[in-house]
Image (cartoon, coloured by chain):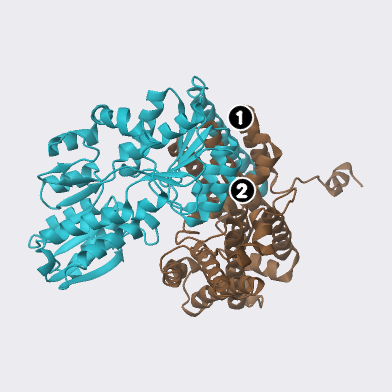
Chain colours: A cyan, B brown
């Protein structure tokens, strides 16, 4: 009796799930039917992260400008194997080209197999050493040096004495390790600076805040807190705000609305942007251009996406872009249209001429 | 003799326990195939099967723990550390097959340690593995200096182990898939045809009754945990051979799909029952949903939602059945 009941329930539940799945798939497929010319797969390493969303926005704007279809996927948590599977699924689904971040070395062989089969691939944001495809991203070690130099300047230059806390939200992630290397290189110019960490401060926003809170509580006399990931500046700002007496300088990466708010209210001090618009737009542009004009892109190369340097009083943008006020930057973080309009000179210049801006891959970590 | 009595003697045809899951899988594949026919290409299905093979293997083994009323949160990091140790051993010049055995052995020890701690400390495995998961992850990070382990030497990458698993040897079916199917046969026979398996189910059904019946419950717990560790170790070395590298994050996200596959496959969280083959079909459903989302081109957020709905339904059904069982007893 129970067994019979149990089986009926399971059949009912599975039938319900299938109906939901089927209707979701069918409903969502209809909107894709309109554009059949070129389809680009865009695979990110995590979904639900504000910085990654800015990259996706850039990619979608490129697809709209170029009149192609874009499919965006990514695992809910950053994990290389799940992402490689998504890339393989994307290739099997018949897209014409794929842009993917490469957060893991275990993705390299699988990606090269896909490239060998004739599928054009462009890497962005996370570089896979050994992948036979161009990479769009920041100069990771150099940007770490910039951040380290700016923090050092704010804590007293080479004569500074005291602790600097360094946090890495994802130990082992190659780009973060490179940034860390650059930061530590710059901070090493001050013999009196003692580095606390680098500590694992986690990716999840709540865990990230708790980690920074704990680090500051244990090192209340720290001169500065330096993070390497998107959630850090916001967390450092909140931690600084909660600990009224601290004068610790806060520095980190990315221009999410939370990070900009922390800079605006003076609880954090420096954030470097990785021009997410370019990191999203350029790979799609490169793929479409290479497909339409039959340009081979099956070898490593590097296109610098630039570094933005933002403090509460200054906004320095790359590629000779017009000067921005801090308020402009905050407004852009909230508006795709304003972002697209601002980057028009880059789209019609630097991005259009991507082939002449393609450098040897060694320049990424120079 | 009356006709009623004759009828009761007739052996009723009974469909296998996994039938509903298989039907669901076929329908799901049918829906995706109807919308995107390229999905049904045999090479495509085989390659996709290979991608989800390790998830399926772990799901097949976690059925043992779920059948015993326990759950392990650390197997992803056991997989990671086993692969890291095997990879480092290979790079250090240890012969490949010995390195492979080292990885599997390390996994077995980690699993046995989980079992030993849960027996000695008299705590549920879920609590013990909450701690040991971080311990294994931490040792892995220290061992590989928070970087990826990538054997690059031609002598290593050209070895049969890497060529076979990496797809460099021609085979109509990916070799990793063949290994996992063989493993499923062994796991199925172990759970359903051996005294060890019956004891596991007995402990899961009623631990106190099992103990009073003379079943060495503590020993069995340690053995099952060691088995989970060994299979995670096998998963780790398979991963190393299949992908050619191990990252610090490898294995960290396996918990949800593996447990979901086992539950969707028909193994209740309440213990006392379990189906190894069901977990394979469950893993294929989880995989098919993920693949379907990509093939159809829906935003990943939808994929997460659909997977979540499947898990909620399965867990809900399990809970209803459990409550009913309690009422009846």
B60 w.r.t. A20: above or below: below
**CA separation in Å, label 1 and label 2:** 22 Å
Residue pictured at 51% horizontal, 73% vertical: B114
Of all residues, the one furthest to the left in this rendering is A245
Q: Quadrant of the C terminus of chain A?
A: bottom left
List x then y, in percent, for residue A79. 46, 53
Viewer-nearest residue: A357 or A179: A357
List x then y, in percent, for residue A130. 49, 53
Q: Which residue is mark 1?
A: B36
- Disc 1 or disc 2, which is closer to the eye? 1
Residue pictured at 48% horizontal, 52% vertical: A80
Label 1 marks a residue whose chain is B
| Left or right position of A295 against B25 | left
Label 2 marks a residue whose chain is B
| Left or right position of A9 against B11 | left
Q: Which residue is mark 2?
A: B282
């Amino acid at each position: 009796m129970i067994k019979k009941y149990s089986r009926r329930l399971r059949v009912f539940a599975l039938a319900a799930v299938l109906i939901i799945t089927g209707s979701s798939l069918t409903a969502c497929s209809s909107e894709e039917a309109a554009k059949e010319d070129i389809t680009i797969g865009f695979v990110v390493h995590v979904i639900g992260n504000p910085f990654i969303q800015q990259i996706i926005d850039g990619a979608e704007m490129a697809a709209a400008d170029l009149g192609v279809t874009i499919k965006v996927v990514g695992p809910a948590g950053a994990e290389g194997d799940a992402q490689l599977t998504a890339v393989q699924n994307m290739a099997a689904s018949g897209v014409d080209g794929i842009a993917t971040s490469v957060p893991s070395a275990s993705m390299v062989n699988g990606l090269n197999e896909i490239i060998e089969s004739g599928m054009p691939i462009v890497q962005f944001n996370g570089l896979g050493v050994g992948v036979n495809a161009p990479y769009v991203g920041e100069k990771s070690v150099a940007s770490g040096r910039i951040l380290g130099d700016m923090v050092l300047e704010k804590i007293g230059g080479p004569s500074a004495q005291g602790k600097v806390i360094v946090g890495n939200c994802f130990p082992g992630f190659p780009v973060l390790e490179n940034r860390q290397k650059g930061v530590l290189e710059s901070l090493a110019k001050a013999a009196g600076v003692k580095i606390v960490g680098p500590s694992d401060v986690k990716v999840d926003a709540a865990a990230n805040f708790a980690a920074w809170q704990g680090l500051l509580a244990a090192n209340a006399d720290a001169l500065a807190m330096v993070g390497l990931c998107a959630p850090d500046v916001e967390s450092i700002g909140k931690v600084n705000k909660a600990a009224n007496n601290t004068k610790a300088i806060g520095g980190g990466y990315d221009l999410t609305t939370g990070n900009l708010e922390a800079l605006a209210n003076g609880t954090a001090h420096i954030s470097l942007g990785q021009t997410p618009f370019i990191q999203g737009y350029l790979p799609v542009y490169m793929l479409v251009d290479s497909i339409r004009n039959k340009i081979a892109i099956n070898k490593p190369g590097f296109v610098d996406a630039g570094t933005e340097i933002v403090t509460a009083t200054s906004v320095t943008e790359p590629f000779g872009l017009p000067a921005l006020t801090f308020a402009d930057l905050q407004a852009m973080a909230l508006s795709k249209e304003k972002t697209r309009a601002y980057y028009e000179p880059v789209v019609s210049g630097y991005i259009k001429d991507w082939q002449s801006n393609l450098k040897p891959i060694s320049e990424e970590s120079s | 003799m009356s006709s009623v009595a004759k009828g009761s003697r007739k052996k009723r045809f009974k469909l296998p326990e996994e039938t509903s899951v298989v039907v669901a899988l076929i329908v799901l594949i049918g829906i995706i195939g109807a919308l995107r026919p390229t999905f049904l290409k045999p090479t495509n299905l085989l390659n996709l099967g290979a991608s989800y093979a390790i998830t399926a293997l772990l799901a097949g083994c976690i059925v043992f723990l779920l059948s015993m009323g326990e759950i392990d949160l650390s197997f992803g990091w056991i997989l990671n550390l086993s692969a890291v140790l095997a990879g480092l051993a290979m790079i250090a010049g240890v012969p490949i097959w010995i390195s492979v055995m080292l990885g599997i052995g390390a996994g077995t020890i980690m699993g046995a340690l989980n079992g030993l701690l849960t027996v000695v400390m008299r705590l549920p495995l879920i609590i013990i593995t909450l701690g040991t998961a971080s311990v294994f992850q931490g040792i892995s990070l220290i061992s590989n200096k928070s970087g990826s382990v990538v054997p690059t030497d031609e002598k290593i990458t050209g070895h049969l182990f890497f060529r076979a698993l990496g797809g460099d040897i021609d085979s109509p079916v990916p070799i990793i898939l063949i290994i996992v199917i063989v493993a499923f046969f062994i796991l199925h026979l172990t759970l359903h045809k051996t005294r060890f398996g019956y004891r596991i189910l007995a402990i899961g059904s009623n631990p106190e009754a099992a103990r009073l019946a003379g079943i060495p419950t503590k020993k069995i717990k340690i053995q099952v945990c060691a088995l989970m560790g060994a299979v995670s170790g096998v998963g780790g070395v398979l991963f190393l051979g299949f992908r050619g590298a191990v990252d610090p994050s490898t294995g960290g996200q396996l918990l949800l799909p593996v447990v979901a596959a086992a539950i969707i496959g028909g193994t209740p969280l309440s213990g006392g029952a379990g189906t190894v083959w069901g977990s394979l079909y469950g893993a294929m459903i989880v995989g098919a949903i993920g693949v379907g989302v990509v093939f159809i081109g829906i935003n990943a957020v939808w994929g997460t939602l659909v997977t979540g709905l499947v898990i909620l339904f399965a867990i809900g059904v399990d809970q209803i059945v459990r409550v009913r069982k309690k009422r009846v007893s």
